[in-house]
Amino acid sequence: MNKTVRSFSVVTGFAVVTRLIAFIFKIWVSRAFGAEVVGTYQIAMSVMTMLFTLTSGAPTVLSRKVAEATGDIKRQNSLATASLIIGTGISGALVALLFALKGKLGFLFPDERCLPIFLILLPTLVTSTAYASFRSWFWGRKNFLAFSSTELLDEVVKILLAAIFAGGVVSFVSGGEAIALAMTLSDALCVAVLAVMYFVSGGRLSKPSGFKELTLRTIPLSATRIITSVTASVTALALPNLLVKNGMSVSAATAEYGRIAGMAIPLIMAPVMLVSSLSVVLIPDVARLRAEGDPSAIRNKLRSAINFATLVACIFFALYLPLGRHVGRLLFGDEKAGELVSNCSFMLFFIVIASVTTPMLNSLGKERVTFFNSLLGAAALMPCTLLLPKFIGVYSMAVGSAACFLTISVLNLIALRRQTGDFLDAGKMAKCLAFSIPLALLGMFSDRLLTAVAGPIVSVAVVGAMTLFFLFIFIHAFKIADVYAAIRMLRPARVSGHKAKTSKPKKPRKRFKASAK
């Protein structure tokens, strides 16, 4: 099994377990506290996410710079130290300023219950920035075990602490505040663990260097993240207010936002975990290949990633469209959240392409391109979010998000083609898309029949199994099997017997001798 397969397996394995635990946690929170508490927490987190974008750019650039400096541990440590200084310096100043102004921050939130949650979360701005720098150092060095395991630890500790606090052990917090306190403490613990791992693995606080290159690359990347977070924050603040203006109570509007932002969209985004895992593995390789000047190898990796992302989207669209209602009701105990999952499942196609192409552009050093593409994506999002609630209510967020991701996907693909040449396998992508739509419609028809006779649990099991069966029959029949698991790049080499194992070293030696002559 080659290194790419092993790395992808490690990242995906940890990501699946981490996201599964996080998803179970969301289910527990939704059932224990209700959509209203989820909504207040999500609104507070949206503002925190926007602040984190101001400090997280340097760690992201750090991973690429560390990958380009493979073998030079001294430079890698100097870059990591510079990233820590930049990130913690900015985040520390922001935290101090916001705590000083805490009495005047109520205008940021449509619901007054969000402010205490926000203040509890605020220290995570510093710890998360340091956490991101340490993880990016491991990422650039392709130490995916350390990179992924700490994320799992963070999630486990957060859930344990949230359960303890929500159970009344700490009397001064409850609901959203308990979840926020659990996140703050778990973040601090995990950055301490990661710092120990950093020093054990050879990392040091060396004389910092690379401030200029980190800063120049960080500015467009941070601007991109700011655009994303600002649009998310504007949506979190504006959408409930617009729903209230159109006749809802404050509690009902907050609950509606909690359903789509805290329940439906996280479920729709779950398959992106697989695409993100592949991106995590490929980014250091693409950065190295760019430094070496190998566009052909870059095209192969891009093609693999795009085809894999398309297949993931097709599989989950065919499952979510017919079964989203039942899954939402079974998991969250909220039928409206399930309807949102079914009706918004079309977003998957745009989300996965944007999710895989944006990091690829960044790994090629095109942070400015991703900034402008994100800006245009936000320009497509905001009119939908601000103008459509009067007509389609909370679905305006789904339509706006779909328009945003579609814009980013198209622009990213155009930019990548200009940089590397033609890399898309349009035939296989079209076949997958063409098959997934009628299969999803067949699933909807089958679901209605089974639900009337046997109930939702049986329908989920039967329709899910049937959908997966027909999908994999189609994949093999049309020879798209190579695409699954990122086509040939991720397929382990076949060996048969001692000869196959010993024949590989001989070929390079012969080529070397021939070239020497």
Image (cartoon, rainbow, N blue to C red):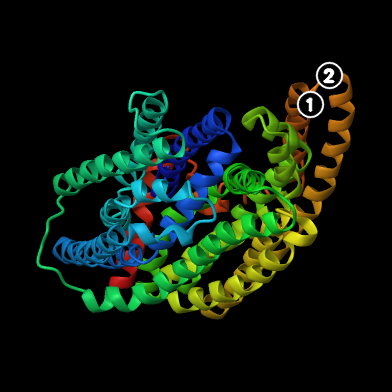
Q: Quadrant of residue 27?
A: top right
Above/below status of 109 relative to 23: below
Q: Position of residue 94 (x, y in %)?
A: 29, 64
Count neighbours of disc 2 (C-alpha within 10 A) and say few if under 14, some if 14 to 19, many if 20 or more.
few
Above/below status of 10 relative to 84: above
Above/below status of 215 relative to 74: below
* Residue nearest the viewer, comparing 100 with 334: 100
Could you tell me if the residues under marks 2 and 1 are in contact, i.e. CB atoms within 8 Å?
yes
- What's the amino acid at mark 2? Ala
Q: Position of residue 13 (x, y in %)?
A: 45, 37
* Residue nearest the viewer, comparing 512 with 386: 386
Q: Residue at x 74, y 23 (%)?
A: 457
| Numbered circle sitting on residue 293 | none
Mark 2 and mark 1 lie on one chain; the one further toward the N terminus is 2
Query: Which residue matches tag 1?
Result: 459
- What's the amino acid at mark 1? Ser
Q: Residue furthest left?
A: 207
* Residue nearest the viewer, comparing 53 with 396: 396
Q: Position of residue 211 (x, y in %)?
A: 22, 75
Quadrant placement of the C terminus: bottom left
Q: Quadrant of residue 458?
A: top right
Count neighbours of disc 1 (C-alpha within 10 A) and say few if under 14, some if 14 to 19, many if 20 or more.
many
Query: Which residue matches tag 2?
Result: 454
Rounded to the nearest whole Å, what is the CA distance between mark 2 and mark 1? 7 Å
Q: Is residue 402 visible?
A: yes
Query: Which type of secondary structure does the marked residue at label 1 adopt?
Result: helix
